[in-house]
Amino acid sequence: MRWNPYLHAIGAAAYIWGVGLLIAYISSLHHDTPDTFTAPIVALSLLVFSVATMGFLFFYRPAVLLLEKKREEAVLFFLKTLGTFGVLTLLVVLTVL
């Protein structure tokens, strides 16, 4: 399998969009219902899942490269992923404003 930092950044952005759309859809269905004890459980579960997903997309491959003593390649992979994600985020922010 070939690793691509640009696809990792696009995957992270797509995941965030998907979660955002899901939250907006669910809140539009349940806007008049009171919060229950399950709301914090769902929120924390989503947080843990999101951290694991972003951890994989941003840090797994660079960590493997570091363990293989390929420091320069690891740093470059991470910076490409982060930079691409930053550009995508900036495009969304500028589009919304």
Image (cartoon, rainbow, N blue to C red):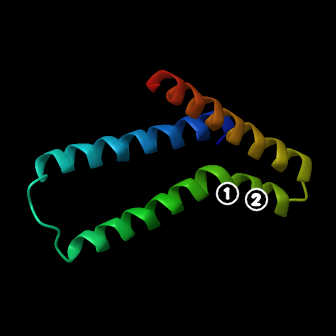
Mark drawn on residue 64: 2
**Are the residues at dot 1 and dot 2 in contact (C-beta closer than 8 Å)?**
yes
Would residue 6 be visible to someone looking at this image?
yes
Q: Residue at x 59, y 35 (%)?
A: 7
**Percent coordinates x, y for residue 40 in the rendering:** 30, 72
| Residue 88 quadrant | top right
Disc 1 target residue = 60
- Cα–Cα gap, marks 1 and 2: 6 Å
**Percent coordinates x, y for residue 50 in the rendering:** 47, 58
Considering every residue shown, the one lying at the far left of the view is: 32
Kind of residue at disc 2: Val
| Residue 48 quadrant | bottom left
- Name the image quarter holding the N terminus: top right
Considering every residue shown, the one lying at the far bottom of the view is: 37
Would residue 4 be visible to someone looking at this image?
no
Vertical side of 15 occupied by 54: above or below? below
Q: Is residue 72 left or right of residue 45?
A: right
Mark 1 lies on a secondary structure that is helix
Vertical side of 80 occupied by 96: above or below? above
Q: Residue at x 84, y 59 (%)?
A: 66
Kind of residue at disc 1: Tyr
**Percent coordinates x, y for residue 49 in the rendering:** 44, 63
Vertical side of 92 occupied by 66: above or below? below
Q: Residue at x 38, y 62 (%)?
A: 46
